[in-house]
Image (tube, grey):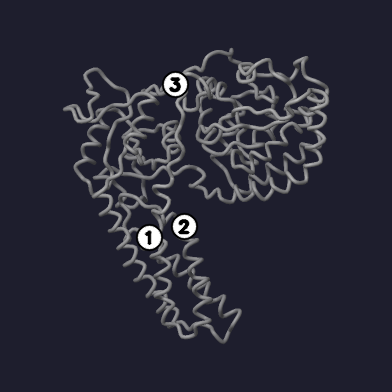
Amino acid sequence: MTTESTSVPPAPGAWPPASRGHAHGLAALAPRRGAPDRLALPPRRTARTRFAAVPLVAADAMAVLLAAGPLAEPHRELRLLLLVVGGVLVLNGRAGLYRTGPFTSVLDELPALAARIGVVWCVAAAAVAAYTPALAIGPAALCSAYATQLVAVCLLRGAAHARERRAGRAHPRSALVVGGPAAAQRFAAALGQHPEYGIRPVGIVGARHSGDSPQPNGERGLPVLTTTEEIHRAVIQNTVLDAVFLTDEPDLVMLFQHYGCTTWRVGERRHGAPMSEHLWGFGCRRLVPPAERRGLTAKRVLDVTLAGPALLLALPVLLLCAVAVRVTDGPGVLFHQERVGQNGRLFTLLKFRTLRPADETESATRWNVANDRRMSAVGGFLRRTSLDELPQLWNVLRGDMSLVGPRPERPYFVSQFSKIHTGYADRHRMPVGLTGLAQVHGLRGDTSIEDRCRFDNHYIDHWSFWQDVRILMRTAAGLVRPAGS
């Protein structure tokens, strides 16, 4: 089995707490499966908000229909509809204009909408004129269509936002407030007195002080939650859909985003932010997960496009490796091991077996087996050439991993490293990968975890589609001179 390494290997033992010095003292976010204190994370709750953007999408599409209606030729109208509707939906989606929130206003959206509608109409008209000059749209018709769509989209989007605000007031979303209890109680009280924002605080996440009442309706205010178990119970029982942060807590942001909650940061001073982005005077912004913030759909497309054909092309090699492992090491060709993926989600990683551990404890907590005498010649060859990693292409196709990203680690070591190395848990902001920036810089096998953590976070902070391509090219070049893992 291939493992990652550190210069300070911890001793095996029971699942340890993973507090990193936060005041709330939360337990580990990704405990080992089967451990007695493990708290299973529920599936992401996306079904409740999956169709939240439908009214806005429908409003944009209807506005295009109203704008294209006065045009004379039906065949020209059909071409324009396809071009304009597609262009508007794509540009608005990339600009985040289909996200809903407590302070969304069509007047704040108006500059972005006007610019994108104008660009789409100009491009669509130019395309029609280039392919069919006889059907070119004149300046007057083009300006009329643009103005008609702009007015229509304001009216329709305004109606959609008004409907959402009414629904929010009638059925507010439960929320947890993260921060110091005193400040969080004051913020929750202000938010509770203004139901127009559609958010109803049901608890505080922070450190409980002497004299604080745990009763939700007591004189002291909302209950204070201090452990992962209490947060888990509150999220499930109160159907919590929002988490409002008064302080920076990256680990908790990841936890709530895993739950499927919308996360908000209040109290920051940001120049250039829309004036309407506030909760009763508290400046507010949405904390967007990296994959959503940076449009990582292209990353997933790259994974599927390359991993699928690579898996098919590698089938002969996979069969040869499987036969070799079966002949030399006996039954059990594939090795299954639990690893920690994006946002602390556990998944089963696949590899060719290169060594048979004594038991599950050794597999989960032993650090390095590179020089283990139990390893056969075939196992050593697979490790040196990284052929034992080929089955992970299936993990990539399943969506457990990406081709490029931080290497996944076992839950036991994630807990240990999160305590030892600052920023280690931040590696899980993006999908874990088959290769990564650290690996192409030689940080594989028995190398410094601190260095690899620094490279992984640098990769996440400066991610781009081209950087993934570059890392894959460097990985392919490195296979010519394999050093193993």
> Residue 143: which quarter of the image?
bottom left
**Gap between marks 1 and 3 measured at Cα:** 43 Å
- Furthest residue in direction front, as rendered: 331
**Gap between marks 2 and 3 measured at Cα:** 38 Å
Name the residue rendered at 38%, 62% in the picture: 111
Of callouts 2 and 3, the N-terminal one: 3
Towards the viewer: 368 or 324: 324
Which structural element holds mark 1? helix
Q: Which residue is mark 1?
A: 55
Which structural element holds mark 2? helix
Q: Is residue 37 above or below residue 124?
A: above
* x and y percentages locating residue 114 in the rendered image: 40, 66
The answer to whether residue 307 is left or right of residue 345 is right
Towards the viewer: 323 or 279: 323
Comparing labels 1 and 2, the label whose residue is closer to the camera? 1
Using a 10 Å C-alpha cutoff, classify the residue at mark 1 as few (fewer than 14 neighbours), some (14 to 19) or many (20 or more): some
Q: Which residue is mark 2?
A: 93
Amino acid type, residue under disc 3 in the picture? Ser
The image quadrant where one finds the N terminus is top right
Amino acid type, residue under disc 1 in the picture? Pro
Name the residue rendered at 27%, 35% in the picture: 202
Towards the viewer: 482 or 349: 349
- Asked if marks 1 and 3 touch (Cβ < 8 Å), the reply is no
The answer to whether residue 203 is left or right of residue 73 is left
- Asked if marks 1 and 2 touch (Cβ < 8 Å), the reply is no
- Furthest residue in direction left, as rendered: 219
Q: Is residue 220 above or below residue 342?
A: above
Which structural element holds mark 3? loop
Amino acid type, residue under disc 2 in the picture? Gly
Q: Which residue is mark 3?
A: 19
